[in-house]
Image (cartoon, rainbow, N blue to C red):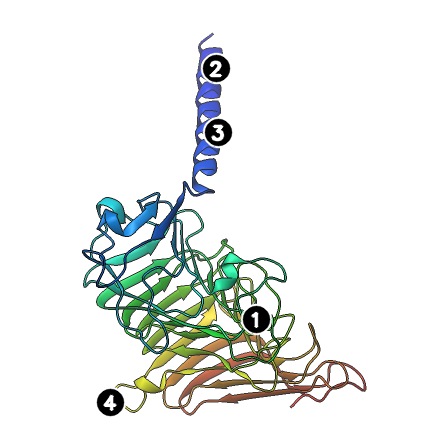
Amino acid sequence: MKTLSMVYRFSRTAILSVVLTLIFSIIYDSHAANDYWAGVPHVSATTNWSDAANWTGAVQTYYNRVEFTGVGATTGTNISVNNVLDSTTGVAQMPIWELDYIPTNANYTTLIQPGITLSLGAGRGDLAVGADVLNTGNNPAPANSVETITIEGTGATLSMVGNLWVSQSSPTPGDTHNVTLDLSGLDNFIDNGGPGSSSEILVATGGEGGVTGGANGTLYLAKTNTISLGDGFQICNQSSGNSVPCAVYLGLANSILTGTGNLIVGGPGTTTIGAWMKFNPAFLGSANPPVAYFAGNGGSGRIANFWICDANGGPQVAGYGFCDFSGGQVTMYVSTMQLGQAGNVGADAHGMLTFDNGLIDVNNATIGNQEVSGGGIGV
């Protein structure tokens, strides 16, 4: 009887545990509500996140989808501070489920006060930059839309566990639309989805909404970056073609680990206008040059695939990809590298890798690959 009783009690405990797990899974997989920024500089009493008057909708950042849609934004070349994360208590409590900066032809600059962390650690933990988030399918942002989103702060941190999107498409092929996320004035950036997650960094890939129509995007990383992804890191891998250069600029100290995905600098859809990864020029030339460490967080400790200009896929257009680590120090461990992988006839691929200090350790490297017999030229 004692054995039966123990089994019975264990069964009830196990069932309760499963039920609680399911309940928490349901809660954490969906956000409670949307919280919209409503503060306007020189109109609102403050531009502080802790001021409830600066929000509409949920009026609470905690576990909600926080959205900056254009209210209180500046225009043109004005990138002055227009919202301040001054506290993470009250209506500005952390963590956030997802943070979206999605204006058109407007700029937001978020100042994080010293010692404060903007935490996207609830639910999805995503950061989406670019108006494509508002759209789906073939309904991109207006033609020639240009936006700059800046997150800055001395002694401040942006921490997330999900996907980072920096991308904006256009209905007009060849126009000069673009969206930029600038973290170069921020001390610390952390993306720690880690192994087993689906976290990835996507720049100029079409955005969260899956919009098509020539995606562009630029990302300036923070001064110190600690990144461990569950998936990959992609720059300009899309189904159309970029119309302005698409770039990622590294910070002073960079540790970037990919998961099951790849590191792609100029994937299919990259045109001859180009896509590249470089150290931020503002950090070069000092007594302490910038450093970057690239590897994988899986069992091999290596990036699965490192492509610099892969033209074999998508729209099959000629492209140019460039990784330039000049002026800094780079350490990289890679399983397979493809430098200039061509596609069909006309889809030539020009890949370039430059570094003057460090180590790039590759198990298998293909330099100039004519993937398709009689097709494009890989250089």
Q: Are marks 4 and 3 in contact (CB under 8 Å)?
A: no
Image position, residue 56 (x, y; %): 33, 47
Whether residue 46 is visible here, answered yes or no, is yes
Residue 224: assigned label: none
The residue carrying mark 4 is: 287
Q: Earlier in the sequence, mark 4 or mark 2?
A: 2
SS of the residue at dot 4? loop
Q: Are marks 2 and 3 in contact (CB under 8 Å)?
A: no
What distance separates the C-alpha of mark 4 from that of mark 3?
56 Å
Residue type beneath disc 1: Ser
Please state which of the two labelled residues, at mark 2 or mark 1, is closer to the viewer. Answer: 1
**Residue 300 or residue 241, whichever sits in front:** 241
Residue drawn at x 37%, y 73% is 221
Residue type beneath disc 2: Tyr
- Whether 163 is drawn above or below 237: the answer is above
SS of the residue at dot 2? helix
What distance separates the C-alpha of mark 4 from that of mark 2?
69 Å
